[in-house]
Image (cartoon, grey):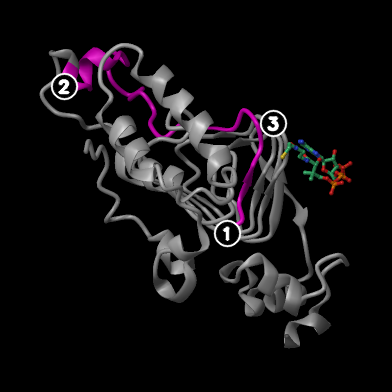
Amino acid sequence: MNVQADNSALSPVSEERRNGEDDSGELNFSRFSIVFVALYANLRGPGCSFVRRQLVRILSPIEGGQMRSGTLRHLMRVVHGIDIGAYSYGCFDPVRFPPGTRIGRYVSIGPGVTAFRRNHPHDRLSMHPYFYRPSLGAASTADVETAPLSVGSGSWVGANVIILPGCRRIGRGAVVAAGAVLTHDVPDYAITGGNPARLIKYRFSEENIAAAESTRWWMKRPAEVEGSHEMSQPWACQDSSH
Ligand SMILES: CC(C)(COP(=O)(O)OP(=O)(O)OC[C@H]1O[C@@H](n2cnc3c(N)ncnc32)[C@H](O)[C@@H]1OP(=O)(O)O)[C@@H](O)C(=O)NCCC(=O)NCCS
C-alpha cells in the first residue's frame, strides 16, 4: 500500500478514542471491504482519482454512510494519512484535507470546507514551487513546512470555511461559522467567524463548558449518550452528574 504520510509526530486523535484504542468496534465493515481496499490502494495513473471517488460512492452506503464506514476510515488513514474518528462526516476527501489531518469523533464538516496546510515561501526571490519542491527538479530540499491540523471531537465547521496553515487546531465542541477564513487556532467551545475569523462568542458559560467536558460524551456511542444525557434540551451544568 502507498502510505503517503507519517503522522506519528502529531497529537493522536486516539486520545479521543474509546479506551485509548481505535474505534473500529463502532464502525461497519462490509464483507467486500478487503476487495475495496486492494482496488483503491493499488490504483495508479491517470483517472486514478476519478475511479477512487466512484469506489467511495459505492462503498459508503454499503457501510452505513460516512458516519459509520470503517473501510472508508481505513483507506483515508492508510492511503492518505487522514485520521477520522467515528460518526464524523464531510471530510472524506484527500484533496480538501491533506495528509496529517486528524479529525475527532462526532465532527460535522460542511460542504466546501478546505484545509490549506502550506504557504508558498513569500520571503524569497521567487515563490514558485520550482524553487522549493524537489520533485520539480530545481530545488534540492523541501523546506516548506506542512502544518498539521487537528479538529476536535464534537465540533461543527460550517460551509465553505477555509482553514489556513496558521490554524492547527479547531477545539473540541467549537463552531466555525459559514465562510470563515481561519488563520489561528479555535478554542474549545468557541464560535468563530468572519475573514479573518474572530471569536463571536462561546457556546456555553465557563461552568457549563467544564460540565460538558466532564461528561466526555464524545467518547460514548450514540445510544449511550442518549441514555445518559438530555440531548434535546439546551445544555445546562446540572446534567453533569450523569
Ligand atoms: C455561526 C452560526 C452557527 C451562528 O448562529 P447563531 O448562534 O444563530 O448566531 P447569530 O445568527 O445570532 O449571529 C451571532 C453573531 O455572529 C455573526 N455571524 C453569524 N454567522 C456569521 C458568519 N457566517 N460569518 C461571520 N459572522 C457571522 C452575526 O452577524 C452576529 O453578529 P452580531 O452579534 O454582531 O450581530 C451560523 O451563523 C452559521 O454560520 N452556521 C453555519 C451553517 C452552515 O454552514 N451549514 C452547513 C451545513 S453543515
Q: Secondary structure at mark 3?
A: loop
Give left or right: position of 17 versus 66: left
Q: Secondary structure at mark 1?
A: loop
Can you tell which quarter of the image residue 124 is in?
top left
Residue at (65, 59) in percent of width and height = 173
In the orientation shown, which residue stands out farthest toward the right?
A: 233
Mark 1 sits near ligand 1, with its Cβ under 8 Å away: no
Residue on which disc 1 sits = 153
Determine if residue 82 is in view: no
Amino acid found under the numbered disc labelled 1? Ser
Residue at (77, 54) in percent of width and height = 201
The answer to whether 221 is drawn above or below residue 65 in the figure is below
2 or 3: tag closer to the N-terminus: 2
Residue on which disc 3 sits = 179
Membership of 58 in magenta stretch: no
Q: Which residues are magenta?
A: 106-135
Amino acid found under the numbered disc labelled 2? Pro
Amino acid found under the numbered disc labelled 3? Gly
Residue 142, percent from left and from top: 19, 29
Residue on which disc 2 sits = 134
Determine if residue 98 is in view: yes
